[in-house]
Amino acid sequence: MEPKFKDIVIDKWNLYFVQGNSITKFRDELKRLKADLKEWNKDVFGHLNTKKKRILKEIEVLNIQDDVSKLEDHRRLKRMHFIGQLRVINKKLEFIFRQKARTNWFVYGDSNFKFYHYVIK
């Protein structure tokens, strides 16, 4: 889970003020929370591949500069920062792919499922 996710949900939920009976109030608050979380999801996860390509390009430029002439300390730190960002993005992408694979397995099942039960009998 994203570290700030719980705080964002709590903060957003506390901002909502909806009138009506408790059921309609709860429904409307959930709708608003869903819209806010979709926006947050776009900001955090939405453009990971684009960010990854940009970071790889920046690292490549710094590597080329390092091959031509020795990099200054601040550029080395910048490259280390980009490598750290790349690791975070790769972890997020891995997490997303794992979730999608799990979802597909639940939806479509395992292709060897029938064979497995046949062998167990």
Image: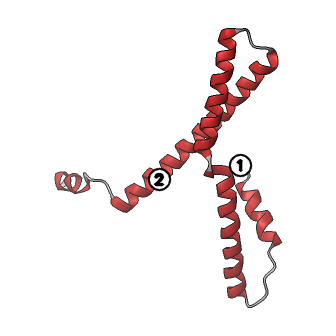
Under tag 1, what secondary structure? Answer: loop
Say which quarter of the image contains residue 79.
top right
What x and y, as percent, mark residue 57? 63, 30
Q: Residues within 10 Å of mark 1 (few under 14, many from 20)?
A: few
Q: Marks 2 and 1: which is nearer the front?
A: 2
Image vertical order of residue 92 relative to residue 42, above or below:
above
What x and y, as percent, mark residue 63? 65, 18
Left or right of 8 on screen, residue 30: left
Q: Residue furthest bottom?
A: 21
- The answer, for residue 1, to whether it is visible in the render is no
Seen at 69% across and 13% down, the residue is: 66
Seen at 62% across and 23% down, the residue is: 60
Find residue 3 and name its label.
Answer: 1
Image vertical order of residue 77 relative to residue 96, above or below:
above
Image vertical order of residue 111 relative to residue 49, above or below:
below
Left or right of 12 on screen, residue 40: left
What is the spatial separation of the Cα atoms under label 2 and label 1, in whole angstroms?
20 Å
Seen at 58% across and 39% down, the residue is: 91
- The answer, for residue 21, to whether it is visible in the render is yes
Left or right of 28 on screen, residue 121: left
Under tag 2, what secondary structure? Answer: helix
Seen at 64% across and 36% down, the residue is: 54
Pointer 2: what residue?
100
Contact, CB < 8 Å: mark 2 with mark 1?
Answer: no
